[in-house]
Structures are given as C-alpha cells and as structure tokens.
Amino acid sequence: MKDEWAENRLADFNLWAAGVGASARQEACLDTRLSDEPGARQVVIGLLVSLEAYIEQCKSNGKIPSSKSWYMHICPKLTLS
C-alpha cells in the first residue's frame, strides 16, 4: 500500500486534469479558458511549477524514474512561465 503512493497521486492528478479539461481541444482546453483570467492562470501555473519542483526532487532522490517533463502530455499547450 505504501509503495503505491506515487501511482495513486498520479491517478489523482490525471483525474484532476481530465476534470478541468487540461488537454481538451483548443477552444475548450484549460489554457484557452484561463487566457482571460490572468490571476487564476498564474495560480494554476504556480501550483504546477511547485508540483514539478517536488517531482524533480523526488526523481533526484531516486524515488521515481526520470522522464520527460511530466506535464507536457497533460497540458501540451500550457507554457509554464
């Protein structure tokens, strides 16, 4: 059970991404919907950047395997800047 923590969190993240339409078609994707809401967009970006830093820390500690940027297959159009 303890060893399944990362898999469970990934499933949680995937459910969140699907629920908010992060990878929906262009006009319905999260990035498009947040384009008129800069404050909300910055909050989402900040959370994703924090999550990425945590994942990188886990990878460097050897707790999860290395991979390309994890968010690119979830939010391919989202620019984290």
Image (cartoon, rainbow, N blue to C red):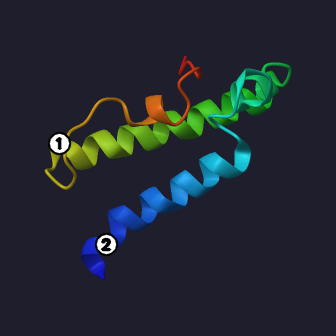
Query: Could you say which disc has been placed on residue 60 in the image?
Result: 1
The quarter of the image holding the C terminus is: top right
Q: Amino acid at mark 2?
A: Glu
User: What residue does disc 2 label?
Assistant: 4
Whole-number angstrom distance, CA of label 2 to CA of label 1:
19 Å
Among the 4 quarters of the image, the one containing residue 52:
top left
Vertical order, 66 against 77 (above or below):
below
What kind of element bears circle 1?
helix
Q: Residue furthest right?
A: 36
Q: Position of residue 50 (x, y in %)?
A: 47, 39
Is 73 situated left or right of 23 in this image?
A: left
Q: Nearer the viewer, residue 70 or 44?
A: 70
Q: Nearer the viewer, residue 19 or 38?
A: 19
Instruction: Residue at 58% x, 33% y: name it.
Output: 46
Label 2: few (<14), some (14–19) or many (≥20) C-alpha neighbours in 10 Å: few
Q: Residue at x 52, y 37 (%)?
A: 74
Q: Nearer the viewer, mark 2 or mark 1?
A: 2
Image-based side of 57 in relation to 39, left or right: left
Q: Please, what secondary structure does the residue beneath circle 2 have?
A: helix
Residue 43 x/y as whole percent: 68, 35
- Left or right of 55: which side holds 39? right
Q: Which mark is residue 37?
A: none
Above or below residue 63? Residue 26 is: above
First in sequence, mark 2 or 1: give its number: 2
Type of amino acid at the residue the image marks with label 1: Ser
The residue under the point 25% across, 74% down is 3
Q: Residue at x 70, y 27 (%)?
A: 25
